[in-house]
Image: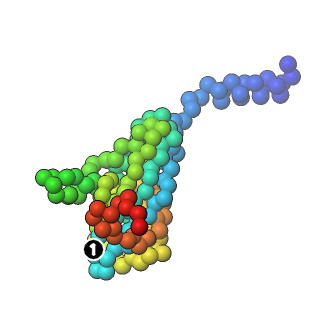
Amino acid sequence: MRPTRIVAAAAFALLASLPVAAQTAADTISIVDAYVRAPAPNAPATGAFMVLKNSGATERRLVKAESPAARVAELHDHIDEGGVKKMRPVAAIAIAGKGEAVLKPGSLHIMLIDMKKPLTEGDSVPITLGFDDGSSKRIDAPVRKLQMQMPGMSGMQH
């Protein structure tokens, strides 16, 4: 074997023996259809919604959110307490391995509280998502004006 082949073979053997770096949550989580609801005039808070898709086999957890648009960002869920819908903070949102977590109105979402300036349709809100392994991912969520639906109208056709 020539010396250059010996060196190349040795380098390949060394690289092959090194442990492969594990993928972080930020590597395996993709964010689809992220948006922030346009708040009512003078409203101090609004919600951010999206689908978190996990391409990895390991369950990941969203544990925090931050945005320069709000003084506080919290992970929230809606609960039904005696027939009354209430929002409550949650410590984390699980994203199953090879699965997804859907953040939508009336369910899991990110609450943006104490807005620093008014948001209008077409604005973009930067949000940094923090995961249980310490990794993070920044997204820019467009502000959308959502139409309110009359109770009992879902699924009805005219």
Determine if residue 25 is in view. no
Q: Quadrant of the N terminus?
A: top right
- Farthest-out residue, front: 158
Residue at 13 percent of width and 52 percent of height: 82
Q: Residues within 10 Å of mark 1 (few under 14, many from 20)?
A: some
Q: Nearer the viewer, residue 108 or 134?
A: 108
Residue 62 in the image, given as x and y percentages of width and height: 37, 48
Residue at 28 percent of width and 55 percent of height: 76
Locate residue 158 relative to residue 28 in the image: left or right: left
- Is 36 situated above or below 18? below
Q: Nearer the viewer, residue 148 or 79?
A: 148
Residue at 47 percent of width and 47 percent of height: 53
* Amino acid at circle 1: Pro
- Is 128 situated above or below 13? below
Locate residue 101 relative to residue 12 in the image: left or right: left
Residue 41 in the image, given as x and y percentages of width and height: 31, 80
Locate residue 44 relative to residue 133 in the image: left or right: left
Q: Nearer the viewer, residue 107 or 56?
A: 107
Disc 1: which residue: 44
- Is 4 situated above or below 101? above
Q: Quadrant of the C terminus?
A: bottom left
Residue 89 in the image, given as x and y percentages of width and height: 24, 54
Residue at 31 percent of width and 77 percent of height: 40
Secondary element type, mark 1: loop
Determine if residue 22 is in view. yes
